[in-house]
Amino acid sequence: MTPQDDLPPLEVLPRDISAYAKGNTGIPYVHRFESGRPGPHVLVNALTHGNEICGMVAATHLLDTGVRPQLGTLTISFAHVEAYNAFDAKAPHENRQLVHNLNRVWSDEWLDGPEDSPELRRARELRPVVAAADHILDIHSTSQPVDPFWVYPAFARNAEVALTIGRPSIHLVMPKGLGSGTPLIQHGRHGDEAGTAGAALVVECGQHFLQSAADLATQVALDFVAHFGLIERDPADRPAPVPQRRFELLQTRMIKTPEFRFVRPLVGFETFAEGELIATDGNEEVRAPCDECTVLMPARLPIVGREGVYLARPIPT
């Protein structure tokens, strides 16, 4: 399959965001607003991946509508603008990253290491921004049109925030991290269950280019900032309570060969019985490690070295 074989609907496209480049922190595309009153420091981060446009929509909404904290500090950042600016409507999935996955390099090993790439340069630039935040919302989207979901380490502080906000209503909980690198939400103290760190969550808002993903990203960004008291939200803007569904990440299966194939087309949230074949990767078989094994984020294309699929199981309520 080539990138042109499965072009998705492009309801939301990138816009010129160069007006936001200067920021006010000395770091390009980073904007910080201090209330002058005690309170938490909340970071809303967009564009960790260049084609995840919903985060841009949410971040520009916060800036364009003059959202300012009534207490504490609010930081709004656009992470990978270089990849964002490489968008091509004929191949809209291709500018996710340029070299490295910016959401897997947030360990000291990578950030202090000898390698160089656009992603590593930007991560090193953003390192003090991420480290300074008490609470982090990292806005993402998915290649497939699946129901939106939270992703977070299995710390009580993260679950409390996601459950209280209530949208999206699906949660992917990571007891041992992703298993394929260190994401932004686990950088430094945010990767430690103990200590003084606040909540740090990813929200996957739906398919990259759908208006519904952009709308949800904006709503969740406002919900997140309001949850910590930085702004007030009209009670009418709160979602109606719905049952929450939680899944535990069991395995992250990486693609080892160009022959990686699923046994059937998968979008996400399909289930498999224990031992059932999910995919093959050359001579290796990927089988369900448990009953009700739930597939999340199945790869569109077999790119060696990238994640092929996340395998999870429902957490009983």
Image: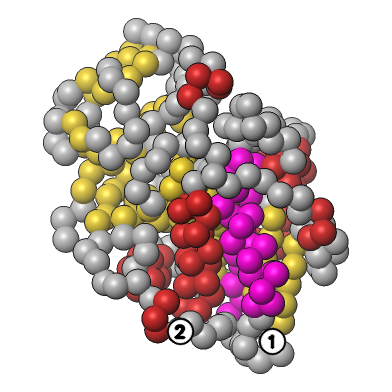
Q: CA distance from mark 1 to mark 2?
A: 20 Å
Toward the bottom, the furthest residue is 37
The one nearer the camera, 241 or 182, is 241
- Within the magenta stretch, is there residue 66? yes
Callout 1 secondary element: loop
- Give the quarter of the image for residue 187: bottom right
- Give the quarter of the image for residue 34: bottom right
Name the quarter where the C terminus is drawn. bottom left
Identified at 21% across, 64% down, the residue is: 243
Spot occupied by residue 52 in the image (x, y as percentages of width and height): 57, 45
Callout 2 secondary element: loop
Spot occupied by residue 100 in the image (x, y as percentages of width and height): 65, 33
Foreground disc of the pair 1, 2: 2
Q: Which mark is residue 91?
A: none
Report which residue position mark 2 lands on. 234
Specify whether residue 92 is in view.
yes
The one nearer the camera, 40 or 298, is 298
Left or right? Give the position of 196 relative to 23: left
Spot occupied by residue 38 in the image (x, y as percentages of width and height): 63, 90
The one nearer the camera, 236 or 226, is 236
Identified at 26% across, 72% down, the residue is: 241
Spot occupied by residue 164 in the image (x, y as percentages of width and height): 35, 73
The one nearer the camera, 106 or 159, is 159
> Which range is magenta?
40-67
- Amino acid, disc 1: Ser
- Amino acid, disc 2: Asp
- Within the magenta stretch, is there residue 300? no
Circle 2: is it few (<14), some (14-19), or many (20+) Cα within 10 Å? few
Report which residue position mark 1 lands on. 35
